[in-house]
Amino acid sequence: MKDLEVTIDKHINNKMNTAYQMLGIATRIKDISNLTPDSFVVLYKAMICSHLEYAVSVWNPHHQSLIEKLENVQKRTTKLVINVKKLHYEERLRRLKISTLKYEKDKRRYDIIV
């Protein structure tokens, strides 16, 4: 159903744009780069991740390009923490104790099936 796919793609793009707007707001916070990793994770999950994961079980991005676009938001966000800025993406996630959005999507999908 092409119409539904176009609607879902628009939804994903809208959510990504909102997440980038929230990222812009977060970068204006004074001394954001000096936040502790725990404080950063709380900020990230409240302001940015919540938009990326909204209704993920319904729209469930299955195109690799959409998954990569969503992950790019998270990659860019994790570079804000000065302690982990220069590390590879996977290592940044490990240090910040954040999972990839793809993993979260698969976990939610499994929860619905069960």
Image: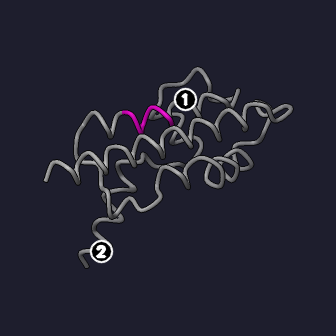
For the magenta stretch, what is the residue range? 69-74
Q: Residue furthest top?
A: 86
Q: Quadrant of the C terminus?
A: bottom left
Q: Residue at x 62, y 29 (%)?
A: 84
Depth order, front residue of 72/51 = 51
Identified by mark 2, the residue type is Ile
Tell me: residue 50, above or below residue 26.
Answer: below
* Residue 58 screen position, x and y as percent: 32, 63
* Residue found 38% across the figure and 58% down from its top: 56
Q: Position of residue 16 (x, y in %)?
A: 48, 40
Question: Is residue 95 placed above or below 58 in the rendered structure?
Answer: above
Q: Is residue 52 left or right of residue 25?
A: left
Identified by mark 1, the residue type is Arg
Residue 35 within the magenta-colored segment of the rendering: no
- Residue 31, relative to residue 59: is it above or below? above
Residue lying farthest to the front in this orientation: 3
The structure residue drawn at horizontal position 35% and vertical position 48%, both measured from the top left corner, is: 102
Mark 2: give few (<14), some (14-19) or many (20+) Cα within 10 Å. few
Instruction: Check disc 2 and report the residue beneath it.
Output: 112
Mark 1 nearby-residue class (10 Å; few <14, some 14–19, many ≥20): few
Question: Hey, which quadrant is residue 30 in on the image?
Answer: top right
The residue positioned 57% from the left and 35% from the top of the image is 20
Which secondary structure class fits the magenta region best?
A: helix
Label 1 belongs to which residue?
76
Mark positioned earlier in the residue sequence (1 or 2): 1
